[in-house]
Amino acid sequence: MAEKDLMTHDDKDIAIFDDDLFTDEGTGLEEATADDFATPLIRILQPQNPQQMEASDKYIPGAKAGMFWNNVTGAIYSGETGLRIVPCQFEKRYIEWIPVDQGGGMVERHLDASILKQCTQGEKGDYFLPDGHEIVETGQYYALLVPEDGSEAEPAIIPFAKTNLKVSKQWNSMLRSTKIRTSQGVRLAPIYAYTYLLTTEIRQKDTYVWYNSVLNRVGPTDPDLIRVAQAFRDVVKSGEIIVRQDATETVDSDLPDAF
């Protein structure tokens, strides 16, 4: 799959039909529920991830460390060009992972930090349950991916864990202090009031080499897109969004925790 800056399709993929071919508004998906759709996770490909290793059966042609990867479509996006995103809702989760040497895979998404009371801390500050499973504190943002060509924005989930968790905390601090001006005066802004550019940068500490997220504010979010963001936020808060976490995915356990 060739590298793509943002989207996996555009208006050129939309076929033209005669109006009289479609006499009703049905799409064939009327009985589908939220559980039947996949909301993708957008991850940074790290040097140890198989998606960028040519010898791996999970290799994606063109993938390189530092790029973003869509775990539903398999699309890859340049970490240098980045992704334009509108954050819609934040949540904290404590994700339980099976270590790679035990087969790997995600076990459960715990809702609060109480699970950490059952853990012991490793040398790198990570948390392990008695059975050896790792608990990874993860900040995740439900967001819209915004193509620069003006085509339709797509919902996604962007997780921040390990060293990237520090980036999430810094971003939250910025979001919490961001203001807007309306006819009623100056007020705190909802997180979707502004659009951001998400890119990656290489980092190194001792023997560890990895890629972290970098966030820069682009400007005010388009009013029409704000309405889409509000609708997505409402769906998230209703609990209807299903996170599609492939049970065969692995945590980047070779990375140090936040420092």
Image (cartoon, grey):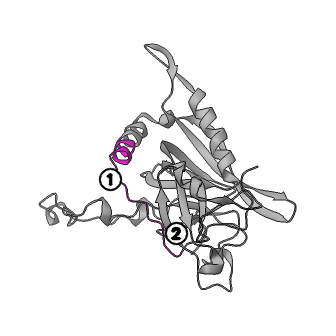
Disc marking residue 106: 2
Q: Is residue 247 on the magenta stretch?
A: yes
| Residue 100 position within the rendered picture, expressed as x and y whole percent measured from the top left | 64, 76
The residue depicted at 38 percent of the width and 47 percent of the height is 236
Q: Secondary structure at mark 2?
A: strand
Secondary structure found at label 1 = loop
Quadrant where the image shows the N terminus: bottom right
**Is 233 one of the magenta-colored residues?**
yes
Q: What residue is shown at x 16% (from left), y 66% (from top)?
A: 21
**Numbered tag placed on residue 21 in the rendering:** none
Left or right: residue 196 versus residue 245 is right
Q: Identity of the amino acid at label 2?
A: Met
Describe residue 194's horizontal placement relative to residue 239 as left or right: right
In the displayed structure, 210 sits above or below 51; it is above
Nearer-N-terminus badge (1/2): 2
Residue 28 percent location from the top left of the image: 20, 67
Inspect this view and state whether residue 11 appears: yes
Depth check, front residue: 34 or 247: 247
Q: Which residue is mark 1?
A: 240
Identify whether 256 is placed above or below 107. Answer: above
Q: Position of residue 151 (x, y in %)?
A: 44, 52
Task: Please say if 215 is above or below 180.
Answer: below
Q: Residue furthest right?
A: 206
**Amino acid type of the residue that numbered disc 1 sits on in the rendered structure:** Glu
Magenta segment, principal secondary structure?
loop
- In the displayed structure, 188 sits above or below 117; it is above
Highlighted magenta segment, given as a residue range:
231-248
